[in-house]
Structure formats: structure tokens, C-alpha cells
């Protein structure tokens, strides 16, 4: 893979298949399942088997994959490698997509040490904080820069995605700066709801809220 650090990837954004957000999420799950099948030497997989592995109904899986035309063969199933490549192209994983992280607190540092991003096609190019000097020596594996350098960096490297880990009171302000600089997707770990223009996608990750939701299903 090569790092995509220019406009090439986003030049064709308008030509992408219009896929619902929930389908995109399921495509990521299908991709993980297909990778495991590929590692086990399987060349084809039935819609029923793949749906079972992804914990969805076969009809839903066929509908999702139908977005790309006829990829499977009745009675034979889907070619694992072709399907994996097709989903990878749709999700933009044929190249490493550049990402930045803003807010290098405890959570931010933990995310910077997570090695799963690159495996899924994302390259965290740099991290930004208001006081980077105080964080030096934390064994970070990406360049740590002052937030004053963030906007020029985004422009220079054509970054379109960011991970936001700043305190709640700074969340909207930083989000505004990211959007103004050209960021189109934000993974928001900041404990606040941020407002963005319609063309910007925000996925909020609220760990406390997820635990609260999970606790509902736990016997008290």
C-alpha cells in the first residue's frame, strides 16, 4: 500500500456509489470476515455463510452487495478475493488514507499506540496538542506538533479525516477549525455533540454512553 497524501483519492468522491451509512458499516464487517476466510485459504463463500459470520440476514447481505452489481454466482457463492477487493475499493482501502489526531491526552495517546488503523487502510500522519512539549518522551510513534501547525499540515498533506480527542469545551471550536481546513470526516471521542455542515460526516464515540447502553442488558 502507498500513503495517499494528495487530492487523488478525493477527486472521484462524487463518482462513488451512493451507499447508506448503515451499509457502509456492514461492509466493514464483511471485509473483516472475508479477511479471516482468505487467511484460512477459502476461495469462495456462500451468502448464507458470510451472513452468518457477519451476524446479518442473508437477504440483507445480498442487498448490500447488490450495490456493486452481480458479484456472486448462484450455487457457487462469492469469490472471496474479488469481493474483498471490491469492498476495499469502495471503502477507499486500496491506499492508506491520511488521518490526524487532535488532543493527546490519555485516550489520544492510547489511540496513537493502536496498530489496527494501518491494517484497515488508515495512516495517522501526526498528532496535535496545545502543549506538545509537555508530552515529549511518551514514546509516541507519530510526530507530535503544536495545534498552531494543524491547519497548514492539513492543507499540505490533503488530510480529509481527523480523530478528535479534546475536552468537551474545546470540541466545537476545534471541529470548526478542522472543517474550515477541509476535513470531511471526524471520529469524535470528545464528550460533546458537535455541529458540522451537511457535507461533513461525524461519528461520535461516547464510551460512557456505550457502557450505559450495555448495562441495560446485564442482569442486575
Image (spheres, rainbow, N blue to C red):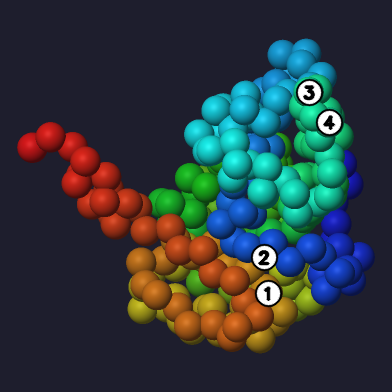
Between the residue at mark 3 and the residue at mark 2, the CA separation in whole angstroms equals 41 Å
Is residue 84 shown left or right of residue 143? right
Residues tagged 1 and 3 counted as in contact (Cβ below 8 A): no
Q: Is residue 19 above or below residue 69?
A: below
Which is more toward the observer, 172 or 141? 172
Which is more toward the observer, 219 or 11? 219
Residue 78 image position (x, y, % from top left): 79, 30
Residues tagged 1 and 4 counted as in contact (Cβ below 8 A): no
Q: Which image quadrant for residue 139?
A: top right
Give whichever of discs 1 and 3 has the lower sequence position. 3
Q: Which residue is mark 3?
A: 75
Q: Which residue is mark 4?
A: 73
Between the residue at mark 2 and the residue at mark 4, the CA separation in whole angstroms equals 36 Å
Q: Which residue is mark 2?
A: 161
Decide: few, some or many residues near mark 1? Use Cα within 10 Å; few <14, some 14-19, many ≥20: many
- SS for callout 1: loop
Q: Which residue lies at the image location 80% right of the left edge and 29% below the top edge?
A: 74
Q: Which residue is mark 1?
A: 183
Give whichever of discs 3 and 2 has the lower sequence position. 3
Residue 131 image position (x, y, % from top left): 50, 68
Q: Determine if residue 107 is in view.
A: yes
Residues tagged 4 and 3 counted as in contact (Cβ below 8 A): yes
Q: Which residue lies at the image location 62% right of the left edge and 77% below the top edge?
A: 200
Between the residue at mark 1 and the residue at mark 3, the CA separation in whole angstroms equals 44 Å
Which is more toward the observer, 73 or 164? 73
- SS for callout 2: strand
Between the residue at mark 1 and the residue at mark 4, the CA separation in whole angstroms equals 40 Å
Give whichever of discs 2 and 4 has the lower sequence position. 4
Between the residue at mark 1 and the residue at mark 2, the CA separation in whole angstroms equals 5 Å
Between the residue at mark 4 and the residue at mark 3, the CA separation in whole angstroms equals 6 Å
Residues tagged 1 and 2 counted as in contact (Cβ below 8 A): yes
Residue 215 image position (x, y, % from top left): 20, 44
Amino acid at each position: 500500500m502507498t500513503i495517499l497524501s494528495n487530492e487523488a483519492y478525493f477527486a472521484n468522491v462524487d463518482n462513488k456509489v451512493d451507499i447508506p451509512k448503515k451499509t457502509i458499516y456492514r461492509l466493514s464487517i464483511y471485509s473483516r470476515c472475508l479477511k479471516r476466510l482468505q487467511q484460512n485459504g477459502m476461495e469462495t463463500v456462500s451468502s448464507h455463510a458470510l451472513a452468518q459470520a457477519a451476524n446479518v440476514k442473508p437477504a440483507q447481505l445480498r442487498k448490500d452487495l447488490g450495490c456493486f452489481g452481480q458479484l456472486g454466482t448462484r450455487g457457487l457463492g462469492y469469490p472471496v478475493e474479488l469481493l474483498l477487493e471490491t469492498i476495499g475499493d469502495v471503502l477507499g482501502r486500496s491506499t492508506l488514507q491520511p488521518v490526524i489526531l487532535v488532543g493527546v491526552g490519555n485516550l489520544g495517546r492510547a489511540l496513537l499506540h493502536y496498530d489496527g488503523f494501518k491494517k484497515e487502510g488508515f495512516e495517522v500522519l501526526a498528532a496535535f496538542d496545545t502543549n506538545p512539549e509537555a508530552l515529549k518522551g511518551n514514546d509516541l510513534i507519530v510526530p507530535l506538533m503544536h495545534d498552531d501547525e494543524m491547519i497548514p499540515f492539513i492543507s499540505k498533506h490533503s488530510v480529509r479525516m481527523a480523530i478528535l480527542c479534546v475536552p468537551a469545551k474545546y470540541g466545537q471550536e476545534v471541529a470548526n477549525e478542522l472543517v474550515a481546513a477541509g476535513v470531511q470526516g471526524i471520529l469524535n471521542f470528545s464528550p460533546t455533540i458537535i455541529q458540522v455542515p451537511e457535507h461533513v460526516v461525524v461519528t461520535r464515540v461516547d464510551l460512557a454512553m456505550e457502557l450505559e447502553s450495555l448495562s441495560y442488558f446485564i442482569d442486575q
